[in-house]
Image (spheres, rainbow, N blue to C red):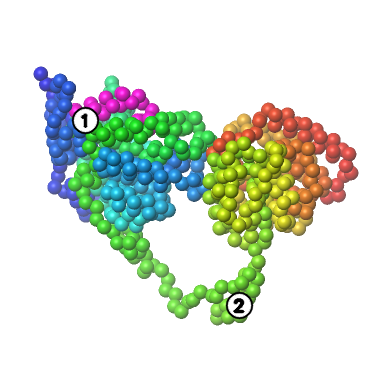
Amino acid sequence: MAATLLIFKSVKRSSLWKGGGASAARTPQATHELRPVEAAASTGLGLVRARRSSLGAEVSATGPHILTIGLEDYYQVGAFNRVIQRGQWYRFERRLEQSTTRALDLLDQFQARATFFVLGWVADTMPELVRLVTARGHEVASKGYYHRNIGQLTPAEFRDDLTRARDAIERASGTTVLGYRVADSWFQPHDLWALDVLAEEGYEYDSSIGPILRNYSAQPWRRFAHLHRYGERTLWELPISTVDLFGFLIPIAGGNYFRQFPHQLVRRAVSHWTQTYSAPYVMYFHTWELDPDQPKINSAPWFSRIRQYRNLDRMAEYLRYFLERYEFTGAANYLGLQQESVLAEDSRTRRRVSGAVVNLVSTLPEIAGASAPPLLASGEVAADATLEGAAAVVVATPTPVTVVIPCYNEELILPYLANTLASVEAQLTDYNITFIFVDDQSTDGTWAALQRVFGDRPNSIFVRHAVNRGVAAGILTGIQRATTDIVCSMDCDCTYDPHELSRMIPLLTPGVDLVTASPYHAQGLVRNVPRWRLALSRSLSHLYRLVLHQKLATYTSCFRVYRRSATAAVRVENNGFLGVAEMLGWLDLHGSKIVEFPTTLEVRMIGRSKMKVMRTIVGHLALLARLAALRATMPPLDR
């Protein structure tokens, strides 16, 4: 005898397809319209041949269901928000093109369609990729501009973020954006104000609710697709799918859950959903989940690394299983919504503000009769380059600077380094920079990778040690090879931001022989570095202050600006990490003036540190004893 199961089902209204209707004069109140309906429970194998879905569409156990894909790269994920700042995204090797192509090819293989939720930042930086998605027959929708949690935004900031992301995606795709999904985490009950904002901004649907465990136990209809009302406006909500396990809802929608939970159990849970409920099964994954060879962010907490990397190599297999057995389509197509074309000119000149359109061209000041001054050769004055009432323009010759970068087994991080240095060159226009890469006899593919990544740059010089000698030896080799008097050194892993050279180099004034980065300065900052390492470094700095003349906060930083004429004579006994502190100690004891620059030290992103902790501690103590003995034999300095 067939049992009867009560589920909540949204009522289809004629105004459903009017998602951007006018607001009522009074303050709208958010409502939902629901009624319980009977769904035949399974009998035998339980296959429900055909049912009327909660959205009014005829469905079967095999579909159609809804497939959504997060179009984002491996370094933009929420699991790494603590260690990777948005301002650092440009540094990472971009792998989004290849992972997106894999996703598109996989969908084509099974004739599936999907909705790609796109970050506005991605649309602005890679518009051709967004156009490729639409050209392959898929919908693009919004995931906000940056990868942010709704808890980080006020309603006003959320509205602005929606506008910025929507404009970027429409500009890139040439089609209207109808849907939204929050980029990081899921909407909790206290976040549902965001649905009102989405409805007010004219969005047709959202897929940000994650009914997990018992967070929506007071609102059980939130587990299934339902219609949200805000005044006269409507918004479809498409929550991720879950299985009820003893009163606790467990996600079975894909993504991380596919990779963490036993695959057999997930398969059975999905089968149960499709044969039991008339609501569509909402599945999702991210493009980066089809890139098992992505660089590993070793600085992330272990839990985040498990969440990111576990079973990446099996994700394509998991997806093929479901794509082969079920029919999938995009959210807009399932809802019967049609994306409209957006003119490129409109995307460039219009901005949405709370449903209104502002013409940006009209906000620009009118400049009559203005023309660009003629280009000037370096160090020359153009006689006709003056404007009325203005002085002649002189372009100064850029100051020559050398940047030394010692490398040892850094093959994986070189793309990250290349992107960072390209940005540094673009910013430091007052300097003519030459880069010297010193390979300290790496045992991986660093030497070949250096040629491949930087070989076409005319301002790059490559030097290779015959044997592994250490980081200090690499810096000294670069200083000796340099032909400029200003020589900078930096870590290959960019734990210090090399853009700070624009502020450090000017500190190398006459009489100053060394400018050193100082994260332990009162105005410095340390981010994501383990506490034990901080305690060790600060303790060593205290001991160095007792031994050396100049009382600094940091003595061990590799990020420095040297005066070559004062440094060429430096001789050290320690060629490794200890030699970096020994170089500073040598200059200090020989009367050189040293200036500290407060800056930020970040944990290494890719790869692992080569420093051996106990050996380094013992080495520093021995070096301190030797520097103290040297100071005792030298005459007092006249400062």
Q: Position of residue 413 (x, y in %)?
A: 55, 42
Does the magenta portion include 256?
A: yes
Disc 1 to disc 2, how far (Cα)?
76 Å
Q: Would residue 594 appear left or right of 22 to someone viewing this image?
A: right
Q: Which mark is residue 382?
A: 2
Q: Which mark is residue 347?
A: none
Write the residue at 33% across / 44% down: 104
Q: Is 550 inside the magenta-drawn segment? A: no
Span highlighted in magenta in the image? 255-276
Residue found farthest to the left = 1
- Is residue 532 rendered to the left or right of residue 106? right
How far across and how far down the image is residue 555, in percent?
A: 71, 41
Task: Mark yes or no: residue 602 visible.
Answer: no
Q: Closer to the N terminus: mark 1 or mark 2? A: 1
| Pointer 1 with pointer 2, Cβ within 8 A | no
Q: What secondary structure prevails in the magenta region? A: helix
Question: Where does residue 83 sit, x and y in percent of width and height?
Answer: 51, 39
Q: How many marks?
A: 2
Q: Amino acid at mark 2?
A: Ala
Can you see residue 573? yes
